[in-house]
Image (cartoon, helix red, strand yellow):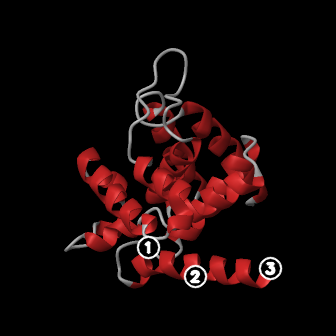
Amino acid sequence: YSSIRSTYDQTIRSLARVTEVGGYTETGHASRVAELSVGIGREMGMSERELDDLRYAALMHDIGQLSLQEPIAGGATTLVSVEEQQRIAGLGAAVIRQTALLTRVADMVERQADWVRSGPGGADDTLPLGSRIIAVCNAYDDRVGASLESDRRLRALEDLRLSSSRVYDGRVVDVLSRIVGRSLALVP
């Protein structure tokens, strides 16, 4: 079982790297989004199975960009219109659905570009939690990338906070803020 699982993980990681190799996303983007997503999911109480699905969805969240004739500058899908983000997410989900085993993963990828539009009671819970997490982590990494500059990371968090309740789930942004805050405390 563990060797099958390892092969499965390697296949998904390789598929996720296609967007990087093709120049559609920055090197390491999918891995950073996946790492942050799983960290947030764990803190929000997701089960191990849900965390596995979240990891796979986060790794493949940009696979729909392969349908674009021209890559988006820096691969930052958050810089294009919501309609284009949804189209890219839908195309990615269609690719993932070709494997009957990953329907939950495909659902998360497809819904990642849907805005939260929450009311006073909190986030729109009709969106899968995994989709809301990926949306926040993708937006954060689009703003920060591999940079370790604390000012850049804090500005990105502030941008996300300002968009909470309209675009992003504020609860997810809060957990991301805690995770980033802990990592900033470790940076001299």
Give above or below for 63 relative to 106.
Answer: below
Residues 4 and 137: in front is 4
SS type, badge 1: loop
SS type, badge 3: helix
Q: Nearer the viewer, mark 2 or mark 3?
A: 3
Residues 85 and 10: in front is 10
Q: Quadrant of the C terminus?
A: bottom right
First reached walking from the N terminus: tag 2 or tag 3: 3
Q: Residues within 10 Å of mark 3 (few under 14, many from 20)?
A: few
The residue pinned by badge 1 equals 26
Q: How many marks?
A: 3
Q: Alpha-carbon distance for marks 2 and 3? A: 14 Å
Residue 135 percent coordinates (x, y): 48, 48
Which residue is pictured at 50% across the width and 51% down the height? 108
Q: Which mark is residue 144?
A: none
Which residue is pictured at 39% across the width and 68% down the height? 95
Residue 153 percent coordinates (x, y): 56, 52
Residues 2 and 40: in front is 2
The amino acid type found where label 1 is placed reads Glu
The residue pinned by badge 2 equals 11
In the visual, does 148 lie left or right of 184?
A: left
